[in-house]
Image: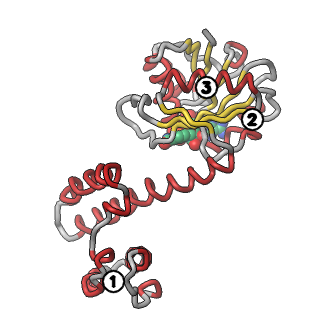
Amino acid sequence: MRSVLLIGTGRAAFHLGHAMKRAGLDLVGITGRNAQHVDQRAAELGIPGLKFSDAPSKADIVVIAVSDDAIADVAMNIPIGDAVVIHTSGASDLDKLLPHPHRAVLWPLVSLSPGEPMDLKAIPLVVDANTAFARERVRGIAKALSDHVTELTHAQRELVHASAAMCLNFPLHLLARAQELLSDHAIDPSILMPSFVAMAQKAAAIGASEALTGPARRGDLGTVRHHLDRLTDDPELRAAYARLSSMILRAYGHPDHGYTDV
Ligand SMILES: NC(=O)c1ccc[n+]([C@@H]2O[C@H](COP(=O)([O-])OP(=O)(O)OC[C@H]3O[C@@H](n4cnc5c(N)ncnc54)[C@H](OP(=O)(O)O)[C@@H]3O)[C@@H](O)[C@H]2O)c1
């Protein structure tokens, strides 16, 4: 079995580390720039916490799970050899791992937040590699972790990454802002949660376009206008509401009466 070293102590390292352990991979240790974080993750995972300077020589496969902007620096500090060096970033090119001869990407297409270790079996893992050797190794790890392994080029990953940001991050930000609005008016913000959870399930069941409801979809311009009138205290949110309403009105064949200019 190929040995794996994990570099990084953040969210991705936490979830990937636990998933690798569960899958029975030979995780030989974890390292990072902050000794305290390394010790904490090592204890949680039940594997050795290593000094960065000693660590990379210890594995056949090195998984760099650090912030996107730090990947290139970390990769540069790993001695060049036969190890397959992998990063976990959807937004980053394989070239960030130069000058290593065998480079690969292992990108979990999911929000990895604090909490219980996540089961990655049902989560899409996107892979890419620059050599057949690296491809075989990264696919081996990915298939041990997930039943949904997909290979995508960097250009394709950028598109998927932008799409994921759009449909995962934006709704959550809007949820947070909507809940703030309710709290500001002494209304329990959790009142929105059952519908929010049901929305994703509905989209999975019947498709996003079919699942979409609301005044803009119906073309109820009077209701859209009333909502805009309630948002005058928050011009930024009001502008977002107007722009998104216009997009929906047009998508469903209604006139938008210039709400994009609000
Ligand atoms: N979280 C997600 O939802 C998610 C999903 C898929 C892929 N990813 C990818 O996973 C990677 C890690 O993301 P994350 O969410 O785990 O981030 P994170 O929780 O913020 O952790 C970042 C890690 O990078 C380390 N780091 C930051 N700057 C560094 C530097 N200059 N040198 C060395 N280490 C440095 C941090 O070290 P310290 O402990 O010292 O701060 C920490 O261990 C990223 O490439 C990200 O795109 C994340």
Q: Is residue 75 above or below residue 80?
A: below
**How many angstroms separate mark 2 from mark 1 (CA)?**
48 Å
Circle 2 residues within 10 Å: few <14, some 14–19, many ≥20: many
Label 2's element? helix
Q: Is residue 200 left or right of residue 15?
A: left
Give the image's coloring scheme: secondary structure
Q: Amino acid at mark 2?
A: Leu
Q: Which residue is mark 1?
A: 232
Q: Is residue 28 left or right of residue 183?
A: right
Q: Which residue is mark 2?
A: 97
Q: Amino acid at mark 1?
A: Thr
Q: Is residue 181 left or right of residue 51?
A: left
Which residue does the image show at 33% across and 83% down from the upper left? 232
Front one among 54 and 35 = 54
Query: Who comes first in sequence, dot 3 or dot 2?
Result: 2
Q: Is residue 147 above or below residue 227?
A: above
Q: Position of residue 201 (x, y in %)?
A: 29, 49
Query: Who comes first in sequence, dot 1 or dot 3?
Result: 3
Instruction: State which mark lies toward you, 3 or 2.
Output: 3
Label 3's element? helix
Which residue does the image show at 41% across and 86% down from the upper left? 259
Q: Amino acid at mark 3?
A: Arg
Circle 3 residues within 10 Å: few <14, some 14–19, many ≥20: many
Q: Position of residue 13 (x, y in %)?
A: 52, 30
**How many angstroms separate mark 3 from mark 2 (CA)?**
18 Å
Q: Is residue 186 above or below residue 27?
A: below
Which residue does the image show at 69% across and 32% down from the upper left? 104
Q: Which residue is mark 3?
A: 139
Instruction: State which mark lies toward you, 1 or 3.
Output: 3
Instruction: State which mark lies toward you, 2 or 1.
Output: 2
Which of the image's four quarters has the N terminus?
top right
